Amino acid sequence: MANERRLIRLEVGDFLEIRPLNENGKVLKSKTKDFTLMGTCFVSEVEWKKGQVLLIDYFIPEVLDSIVLKMVVIWSEFIDIDKGYFCGGEILEVEEAKQQEFANYYFKKLKEKFFNK
């Protein structure tokens, strides 16, 4: 199977608040496993269904603020009772006013990974 990834995944542990789009359900807290400008992976205590659209408040540590991402679940896999599910999704939209901030954060993390060793 060919690797279809177009961007480098960056392992981080950034804080997330996740909620389903168009539902007034419980907001779940999680942390990212990794992210790119196109998607993110995270661990969740609940199973999200493939194709489900989520709103994610992605907290960037340096600015103490969040960026709202709209993401569609691509896959969700049960890990175990303690960890729950490992989920991955594709970003559909980034909060318009903070798109540059999100891109800058990704490129900052790339620079740290490859040039600040």
Image (spheres, helix red, strand yellow):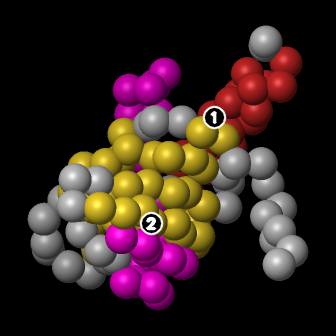
- Left or right of 40? Residue 86 is left
In the image, what residue type sits under mark 1?
Tyr
Q: Is residue 85 magenta?
A: no
Query: For mark 1, what is the residue?
Result: 105
What span is colored magenta in the figure?
49-78
x and y percent of residue 41 in the render?
Answer: 51, 57
Q: Is residue 69 magenta?
A: yes
Which of the image's four quarters has the N terminus?
Answer: bottom right
- Left or right of 36? Residue 12 is left
x and y percent of residue 77 in the render?
Answer: 42, 72
Query: Residue lying farthest front?
Result: 80
Label located before the other in sequence (1 or 2): 2
State whether residue 112 is above or below residue 84.
above
Camera-nearest residue between 96 and 50: 50
Whether residue 39 appears in this view of the structure is yes
Camera-nearest residue between 107 and 4: 4
Q: Element type at marker 2?
A: strand
Whether residue 56 appears in this view of the structure is no
Q: What mark, if any, has residue 93 been given in the picture?
A: none
